[in-house]
Amino acid sequence: MSKQDQSQQGYTPRKKRKKKPNGRRLFLPILLMVGIVYSLGVFSSNYLSFIKPSFVHSVQSQEELLEESNAPVVEEIHYPVPETLILVETIEEPSSEIEQGKEEKLVHSQKEEKKVTEAKVLEVKLEPKKQEPVIEKVVDEEPVVEQVIMVSEKKSEVEDKPVQAAANRVAVHEVQPKETLFSITMQYYLSGSFQGKVADFNGISNPETEVKAGMKLELPDPAILAFHQVKQGETLFSITMQYYQQGKFQEHLASYNGIKNPATDVKVGMVLKIPNLSIVKVEPKETYSLKINKGTNTLTVFRNGVVIKSFPIATGKSSSLTPEGTFKIVNKVEKPWFNPENIPGGDPRNPLGSHWLGLNVPGTKGYTYGIHGTNNPASIGTYASKGCIRMYNSDILWIYQNVPMQTTVEIVSK
């Protein structure tokens, strides 16, 4: 093949030729895109650095506002391990383990790792000045809980125990067979109105079933401190010193027991009543005495030997029923109980009326014969009693209020 043919064979017309890509045309768009991306990056960086201080300042301001709020925000805490919250009220007890002044404690259950991760606000005290709430973290306080329970039980026991009334003097009496609380109070207080006081002092709620022979009763501030049986070698003076520590009360002790001559009248085996100092006192300037005339059924009151009053009375159905002689008033009872028929004091059926003044007729201890009221006023002025002296309730009230204990009473037949 000739050179001309070869040249013609490798020749391609201009229209049929494929155009080669021009690299210079792509360079400018790529460079422009790189510039745009770079500019955006620089702008974003500058913008974030500009707004970051404002954003941080806003967040800090919100946190400060929350901290300054008086009402603390308590978030519910979810622990991965179940915990038990025990609220313990502190008790003011002087102990090294329990501090005074704590009002509440938050006790967490025991864990292998004795570590507190969270705590709740126990109390916030609002005061004029700003004060941060105190958060107490207490771990492993089971012994304290046990001690608090023990103290509470002790306090309840003290509160349940009745408080015994104070007394200046306390006499001890051993109950004898057939004795009752009424007879014992009559013996020591000269009045049955002290039964409630003696029962309360000894913790007795039902005297009829609880007072038994052999038991010992404590008698607070009785009128009669003791019943002393005279022993060999004792004198009235030594007995006075034993109970009163002062010999000046010998005369009053003798007078109370009807002793005129201590040298001859005080004998071995006799029983002396030792009265309380409240009733052992110098006789008043005004002395009273009573005279009962069975013939006229009248009771006359003398003051310093002068007649001041006279009352109508009723005496025994027969002359022998009302004893004659000189006696003394040894006890007083308001609303006396009529034992033979078990009628309580104040009952309209009670024949003893409103008041009783017992006489120390020999062998009776002042419980058999006395001056008393009545529930049958029509009997006054007649011979109607079983031996006692009856009066109108208004008249016996005057005698009860004005005539003192140990007043002499003379009963005559004319």
Image: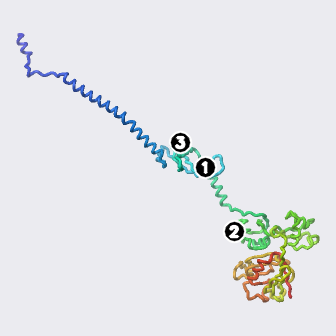
**Label 1–label 2 contact, CB within 8 A:** no
Residue 332 sits above or below residue 28 on the image: below
Which residue sits at x=32%, y=30%?
42
Say what secondary structure mark 3 lies in.
Answer: loop
Q: Is residue 363 above or below residue 92?
A: below
Residue 116's disc is 3
Query: Could you say which disc has been placed on residue 206 in the image?
Result: none
Query: Where is mark 1, residue-wise?
Result: 101
Is 244 left or right of 377, judged from the image as shown? right
Looking at the image, is mark 1 or mark 3 earlier in the sequence? 1
Q: Does 252 sit above or below residue 340?
A: above
Task: Identify the residue shown where x is 40% and y is 36%.
Answer: 53
Q: Where does label 2 land, which residue?
A: 205
Give the side of residue 354 with respect to residue 85, left or right: right
Upstream in the sequence, badge 2 or badge 3?
Answer: 3
Q: What residue appears at the point 42 percent right and 41 percent down from the top-left corner?
A: 59
* Numbered disc in front, either 1 or 3: 1
> Looking at the figure, which quarter contains the C terminus?
bottom right
How far is disc 1 from disc 2 in space, using C-alphas? Answer: 42 Å
At horizontal 84% and vertical 68% (from top left) the residue drawn is 274
- Image coords of residue 7 (percent x, y): 7, 13
Secondary structure beneath dot 1 equals loop
Q: Nearer the viewer, residue 137 or 108?
A: 137
Q: Nearer the viewer, residue 352 or 136?
A: 136
Between label 1 and label 2, give the one nearer the viewer: 1
Kindly tell me whether residue 112 is visible in this rendering.
no
* Picture quadrant of residue 137: top right
